[in-house]
Structures are given as C-alpha cells and as structure tokens.
Image (cartoon, rainbow, N blue to C red):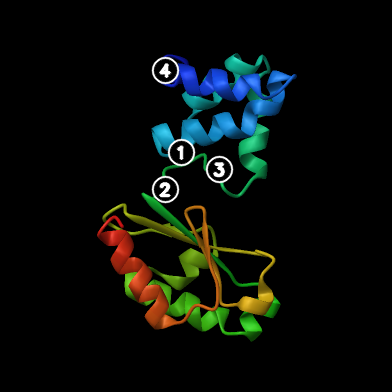
C-alpha cells in the first residue's frame, strides 16, 4: 500500500496543502511510479488518503495526459503532431520514431502503442506549447526540442542504457 511504503513522502506532500484534496496530483505521481500506471487500487488509495470518492480521483487521472489508467512502457514518449508542429516535420518525425521502435504509426496516432519489450510507449498529443521548436517530444517528464533522427536515436541509446 502507498500509505505504508511511502508514508514519509505522503506526509511531506500533505503538509504542503491546507486542503488534502489539493495533494491528489503529487500523490498520483507516487502511485503511478510505484505501480507503473494508476491502477484501480492506487486510485482508491489516493482517494482514501485525501478523503474523496474514487470517482473524483479517477476523473483527475482521465483529465491529465501524464496519468495512465492502463499499463504503459517504462518510458513514455509523447510527440506533438498538431498542425504547426506537422508543418515543421512532426509527421516525418513520428514515422522515424515508429520505425526505430518497430511500432505502427496508425496505432501510435490513435491511442498509442507500447514496444514488445515493454520499454517504450509512444503516443501523439495535440499541443506541447513549443511549436516554434518542433519537432518536439516529452519523454517521461523531460522535453526535447528541435529533434531530428540523430538526436532521437542518441536519446534512445541513453534510455536503453538507463542513463
């Protein structure tokens, strides 16, 4: 259980907020890191910690694109492919990412896809507010701008080597 395993961290987070409900986001980050995604059990645990119904926490998970209610890879790669980014090469970049990771571009563009080894989940997103530096991607919680094939391949090498 989160409350047992991460007791000190949870207490530190709760101490920052006069209303415990305000701690839902940081608690969900802990839950997702612990379980790999926001499982139903994790959602119930967070709800219990902050004193709300699980439905409320589930709605937060559904709203934010950085929370997942299904299994994802160890690393999540979100590539912006909205129109301004597409005009700067995002579509071709998505094709390269899919080729490099042996994924289906259609699946990546329609909900995302995870590599067979479970290491990477790739999905496209609508806007990352960096169109002027496209192609860009958020990998886990880090932004990478002005990407090209070489830069992406270097990032993948580092991630595969856990650096």
Crowd tier of the residue under label 3, counting other residues whose Cα lies within 10 Å: few below 14, some 14–19, many 20 or above: some
| Residue pointed to by mark 1 | 37
Labelled pair 2, 1 in contact (Cβ < 8 Å)? yes
Q: Is residue 50 left or right of residue 117?
A: right
Query: Real-space Cα distance between discs 2 and 3?
Result: 10 Å
Query: Real-space Cα distance between discs 2 and 4?
Result: 21 Å
Q: Quadrant of residue 84?
A: bottom right
The location of residue 51, given as percent across then percent down, is 66, 14
Crowd tier of the residue under label 4, counting other residues whose Cα lies within 10 Å: few below 14, some 14–19, many 20 or above: few
Crowd tier of the residue under label 2, counting other residues whose Cα lies within 10 Å: few below 14, some 14–19, many 20 or above: some
Q: Earlier in the sequence, mark 4 or mark 3?
A: 4
| Residue pointed to by mark 3 | 67
For the N terminus, the quadrant is: top left
The location of residue 143, given as percent across then percent down, is 54, 63
| Residue pointed to by mark 2 | 72
For label 4, the SS is loop
Q: Residue at x 47, y 36 (%)?
A: 32
Q: Is residue 90 left or right of residue 35?
A: right
For label 2, the SS is loop
Labelled pair 4, 1 in contact (Cβ < 8 Å)? no
Q: Residue at x 47, y 16 (%)?
A: 3
| Residue pointed to by mark 4 | 1
Given this view, does label 4 or label 1 mark the residue nearer the observer?
4
Labelled pair 4, 3 in contact (Cβ < 8 Å)? no
Labelled pair 3, 1 in contact (Cβ < 8 Å)? yes
């Amino acid at each position: 259980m989160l409350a047992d395993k991460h007791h000190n961290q949870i207490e530190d987070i709760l101490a920052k907020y006069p209303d415990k409900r305000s701690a839902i986001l940081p608690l969900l980050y802990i839950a997702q890191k612990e379980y790999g995604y926001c499982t139903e059990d994790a959602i119930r645990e967070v709800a219990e910690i902050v004193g709300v119904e699980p439905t409320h926490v589930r709605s937060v998970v559904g709203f934010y694109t950085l929370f997942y209610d299904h299994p994802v890879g160890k690393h999540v790669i979100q590539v912006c492919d909205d129109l301004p980014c597409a005009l700067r090469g995002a579509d071709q970049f998505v094709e390269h990412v899919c080729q490099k990771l042996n994924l289906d571009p259609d699946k990546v563009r329609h909900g995302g896809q995870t590599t067979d080894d479970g290491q990477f989940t790739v999905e496209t997103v609508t806007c990352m507010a960096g169109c002027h530096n496209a192609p860009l991607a958020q990998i886990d919680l880090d932004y990478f701008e002005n990407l090209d094939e070489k830069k992406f391949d270097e990032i993948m090498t580092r991630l595969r080597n856990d650096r």
